[in-house]
Amino acid sequence: MDVVKKEALELILEPCFFMKSLKQILDERTGFSGRFSKHEFQVFGYQLALNLGDLAHKSLYIRLAKEEDRILLEKALGFVKDSKAKSKAKLFMWAVKQLRQTGQIGVGERKDPNCEKSN
């Protein structure tokens, strides 16, 4: 029994048993927890960034989720998901631009009433 206790004690006292590098801890974190997001559009914007593989520009997608029509963004995302493009983020932005120009959905509509154009 003493041998088992000694081996267990050596394993516990081994530095890498309790200590993890910062990289390991960050790699274990998956997804975007709701505890950091106050609004639903933040979660949607982060999900856009994940789906497009462009986490470096997640603030752009959060802003788009806040200001643009949700249907427009979902339609553009659906277009991009089916493609085999090298850069899904570029294709997504192109699709959003095309949908805005054609006027099919949400032509320049903003959810914020303070952004209305003055006559």
Image (cartoon, rainbow, N blue to C red):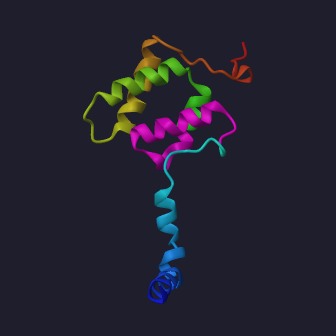
The reply to whether the magenta stretch includes residue 118 is no
Residue 89 in the image: state x and y as whole percent.
Answer: 39, 38
Residue at position x 55%, y 45% in the image: 32
Q: Is residue 15 above or below residue 82?
A: below
Q: Is residue 104 above or below residue 18?
A: above
Residue at position x 45%, y 85% in the image: 7
Residue at position x 48%, y 58% in the image: 28
Q: How many marks?
A: 0
Residue at position x 70%, y 38% in the image: 38
Q: Is residue 101 above or below residue 91?
A: above
Magenta residues, dominant SS class: helix
Residue 53 in the image: state x and y as whole percent.
Answer: 40, 44
In this orientation, which residue lies closer to the viewer: 83 or 43?
43
In this orientation, which residue lies closer to the viewer: 103 or 105?
105
Horizontal side, residue 94 vs residue 71: left or right: left
The reply to whether the magenta stretch includes residue 44 is yes
Residue 46 in the image: state x and y as whole percent.
Answer: 53, 39
Residue segment shown in magenta: 37-60
In this orientation, which residue lies closer to the viewer: 46 or 28?
28
Residue 83 in the image: state x and y as whole percent.
Answer: 27, 30
Residue farthest to the front?
1
Image quadrant occupied by the C terminus: top right
